[in-house]
Amino acid sequence: AAGVIQSPRHLIKEKRETATLKCYPIPRHDTVYWYQQGPGQDPQFLISFYEKMQSDKGSIPDRFSAQQFSDYHSELNMSSLELGDSALYFCASSLGGEWGDLRADTQYFGPGTRLTVL
Amino acid sequence: KQEVTQIPAALSVPEGENLVLNCSFTDSAIYNLQWFRQDPGKGLTSLLLIQSSQREQTSGRLNASLDKSSGRSTLYIAASQPGDSATYLCAVRPKNSGYSTLTFGKGTMLLVSP
């Protein structure tokens, strides 16, 4: 079965540079979530989109922005990178629907993009 | 603010043992609870999801229970195998933090030795 695709898988940037991470959800999934997992930390929710509109915002820095496109893929743009931004960035997707619907509730995670800021 | 705690932080067992991983959360106002598996440096694989109205879910050798009123969940793994070695994360979807948010525990690192 098709899974969530993230690109690139690894990215190395210098401080103050810009990075763009891409996420391609499972086909027919219309909801995308972004998470950041620092070394030895649990994943922290950043932001989510449903039907191309931002649906929730978590602990996303102002230097970061994201959007969901008409084909439902999403991009996370990170500017003025700092050393502390080094982390594993996960994208997850789900099938939107009435809450309580198992299909809508289960978030399927991609393999992540490992960002290293030097 | 919802906090999720997992005990133990690490667990080492011989192959074939049955084991229980524990997860507790501070606010019982949740939509659901989800158990994940994470291999080193890899993504998260969803194992089981329990809705707030449910008591347990089963998948193969895995059984997850939920006691929402006491803020506890357990993941039971029967007849453990070396391939079960990974970090197991539980996450809740709190009702007071936006529907999208999953709040994770820090995980239990499991090692099953042959």
Image (cartoon, coloured by chain):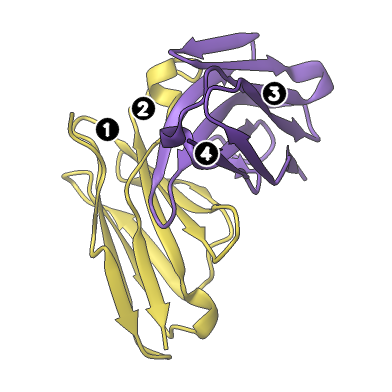
Chain colours: A yellow, B purple
Q: Earlier in the sequence, mark 4 or mark 3?
A: 3
Q: Position of residue B108 (x, y in %)?
A: 63, 42
Tag 1 subunit = A
Q: Is residue A46 visible?
A: yes
Residue at the spot of label 2: A96
Residue at the spot of label 4: B113
Q: Is residue B91 visible?
A: no
Labels 3 and 1 within one chain? no
What secondary structure is found at the residue carrying circle 3?
Answer: strand
Q: Amino acid at mark 1?
A: His
Which labelled disc corresponds to residue A29?
Answer: 1
Of the two numbered discs 3 and 1 in the rendering, the one whose residue sits closer to the viewer: 3
Tag 2 subunit = A
Distance (Cα) linking label 2 and label 3: 26 Å
Tag 4 subunit = B
Which residue: 34% across, 84% down? A13
Pointer 1 and pointer 2: residues touching (CB < 8 Å)? Answer: yes
Along the horizontal axis of the image, is A102 left or right of A75? right
Q: Quadrant of residue B5?
A: top right
Labels 2 and 3 within one chain? no
Distance (Cα) linking label 3 and label 1: 28 Å
Labels 1 and 2 within one chain? yes
- Label 1 Cα neighbours within 10 Å, binned few <14 / some 14-19 / many ≥20: many
Residue at the spot of label 3: B73
Which residue: 43% across, 47% down? B39
Which labelled disc corresponds to residue B23?
Answer: none
Q: Amino acid at mark 4?
A: Ser
Pointer 3 and pointer 1: residues touching (CB < 8 Å)? Answer: no
Q: Nearer the viewer, residue A49 or B32?
A: B32
Q: Position of residue B36 (x, y in %)?
A: 50, 35
